[in-house]
Image (tube, rainbow, N blue to C red):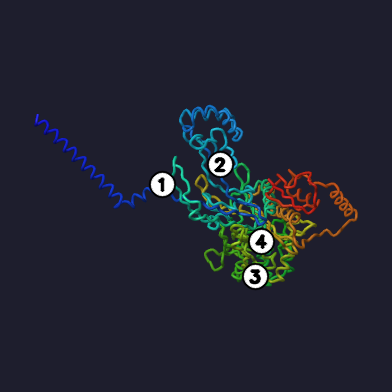
Amino acid sequence: MATHKKSILTRFYIVGAFLAFFLMAIVFRVLTIQYSEGDKYRKLATELTIKQDTIYANKGNVYASDGNLLATSMSKFTIRMDLVTVDSEVFEKNISELSEKLSDMLGETPEYYQHKLRNAKKKKNRYLLIARNIGYTDYLKMKQFPIFNKGVYKGGFIAEHKTVRAHPIGKIAERTIGYDDKRGGAGIEGAFSDFMQGENGLRWKQKIAKNQWKPINDVNEKEPIDGHDIITTIDVNIQDITHHALLRKLEYFEADHGCAVVMETATGEIKAISNLGRTSKGLYYEKRNYAVWESHEPGSTFKLASLMAALDDKVIDTSTVVDTGKGRFYVNDRKVEDSHRGGYGKISAARVFEVSSNVGIVKMIRKHYDKNPQKFYDKIEEYGFTKPIGFKIKGEGIPYVPNPKDKKRWNGISLEWMSWGYGISVTPMQTLMFYNAVANKGVMVKPRFIKELRRNEKIEKVFDTEVLNYQIASEETLNKITKVMENVVVKGTAKNIYSRNFSMAGKTGTAKKYIPRRKNVEGKYEGGFYSSDHYVASFAGFFPAENPKYSCIVVVHDPKKEKGYYGAIVAAPVFKEIAQKIYTTTPIDKQSVKDEVTFDAIEKEYQNFDKKINKEYRTVPSVKGMSGMDAIALLENIGLKVKLTGVGTVRSQSLKRGEKLVKGRTIILKLS
């Protein structure tokens, strides 16, 4: 008995000792945590319950020169649903109404959504996709739908937010406006992304019940700073004109791709730029920025540089006679041929340019520069053709002009081929810059896309006109050049676009495309020749001819040969349409109008029509559905001031139909 009692006491002492030791260990650990490792664990606790949340800055907008929005950030939401959190009774009571609401907004039938939701409920789906990329307005509406209006934890409503860039005017000029995403940061958005991103802000948040976070303070630790807004040189009206004029011709000629650019002569501001490439289905979209990126053989538009060099060096005059013979000429066994069969015989240097005689221009340049080709090259270098312009926009094409000093690339036909636009490679923008310098009385300005950087409507930086060459040629040379360019339209290769109503000056270009030597599918080499089936048609010039306001270039690659391929037929009509519509919709100082005859009957009829309009319209008419141009003409004729946003047809107007007409009031038209 004593032995048994002793055994029990021994066990009790052991247990007591263990408990005492365990208690001492706990006390020791508490003291250690409290004093030795206290900072460490307090920091860990803070990290688990407090976080520094990023407040993302708004990316800057891109605006046209007239204030129209070209690119902006928009909120998009992906909506999902947690079916597990929704009470079964609530689900059954509201599923029919929810399905009907979803059907009205998203388009599928109510039965489709009922089946989808019930099936997801049965499978205990906690992340069911309801809709992708809906706008903020639809998000707010959906948030109030039955079941969803009970929130995240009772209604299973999950909204994932993201910001995307949107182009309010659609695909027009998309490649130039650009984007800063997986497509490579092209265009203005890519070039100025550092300015547009802004600086993110910071705010401390504390974790509360149900895994939610709330701000600790009423103010942010660091306020976000929005990015700069970019004010471009683009004019939405001119851009719309240019885009559609080019598009119509590309579609008609089934061309592979093309570009058209309009530049303000004095400032170098790019008012419109359209770059359209063809898909396999025959549709066109902004595929590449061909005007900036694509370096190619220009053909006859380069003859302007050749003629200018010879005139400025005074080795010829516009009256100098050139014998073009029968329109065929050989240089080191390589044929130069005019498109006009039988040639032009003996003609002046001016006429050589007007009819675009290949033989004539080659003979002139060969005669006067064959012994000193470097002198000719130096002129071409002065004209800005030998190096890139230097845009901030990524992907500018690299020009190629052979230099006589480079013995490996210079050969027996380099000079002659260069003179008529072959054997060299330049971008459309370089050609336009050169033609614009002629229009600008010899002052070569750098083409530019940006006018200002703004933040909170305050101007922070202005981009001024940059002069690259103050005088590319003498005044005498420029006057002669301008006259022969005007004659190209009046009586030369582009006489098909001549108009008595407004003056234009320019030069056509038609170049055969070089097919490089390469292996075909059979492994055999082919190519290495100029094709008679593939052409580049172009036209470059300015308007009005006397006091140029704008310069313009149109380049079309691979038009369908059966429909036409000459620059005069394919590209020049695009130039004319652009010029004509700019004349009628944009004020141009001292524009040249050549209608010399006036008729009293016509003038009287116009006055009667004006009186009729003023008498008929005592109230504001509806112009919904009309084109922007037609709406402007009507509303301005009845005394209203018109302000446009967007392009296309009129979608809405600020003054309602039937309102009393008050002359001088401003009406805002929103175009689709």
Name the residue beneath numbered marker 4. Answer: 329
Which quadrant of the rendered structure holds the N terminus?
Answer: top left
Name the residue beneath numbered marker 1. Answer: 49
Q: Which amino acid does label 3 sit on?
A: Tyr
Q: Distance between the residues labelled 4 and 2?
A: 64 Å
Pointer 1 or 2: first along the chain:
1
Q: What residue type is labelled 2?
A: Asn
Pointer 3 or 2: first along the chain:
2
Residue situated in front as seen by the camera: 257 or 619: 619
Instruction: Please tell me how crowded label 1 is: few (under 14), some (14-19), or many (20+) other residues with Cα within 10 Å.
Output: few
Kindly check if marks 4 and 2 are in contact, taking CB atoms under 8 A apart as contact: no
Q: Distance between the residues labelled 1 and 3?
A: 66 Å
Looking at the image, the residue that sits furthest to the left is 2
Q: Relative to 136, say whether 386 is above or below.
A: below
Kindly check if marks 1 and 2 are in contact, taking CB atoms under 8 A apart as contact: no
Q: Relative to 434, say whether 607 is above or below.
A: above
Instruction: Please tell me how crowded label 2 is: few (under 14), some (14-19), or many (20+) other residues with Cα within 10 Å.
Output: some
Q: Which residue is at 59% across, 62% downward?
A: 460
Name the residue beneath numbered marker 3. Answer: 470
Q: Which amino acid does label 4 sit on?
A: Phe
Instruction: Please tell me how crowded label 4 is: few (under 14), some (14-19), or many (20+) other residues with Cα within 10 Å.
Output: some
Q: Where is residue 625 in the image (x, y as percent from the top left)?
A: 73, 43
Q: What element carries label 2?
A: strand
Name the residue beneath numbered marker 2. Answer: 133
Pointer 1 or 3: first along the chain:
1
Q: What element carries label 3?
A: loop
Q: Is mark 4 on a helix, strand or loop?
A: strand
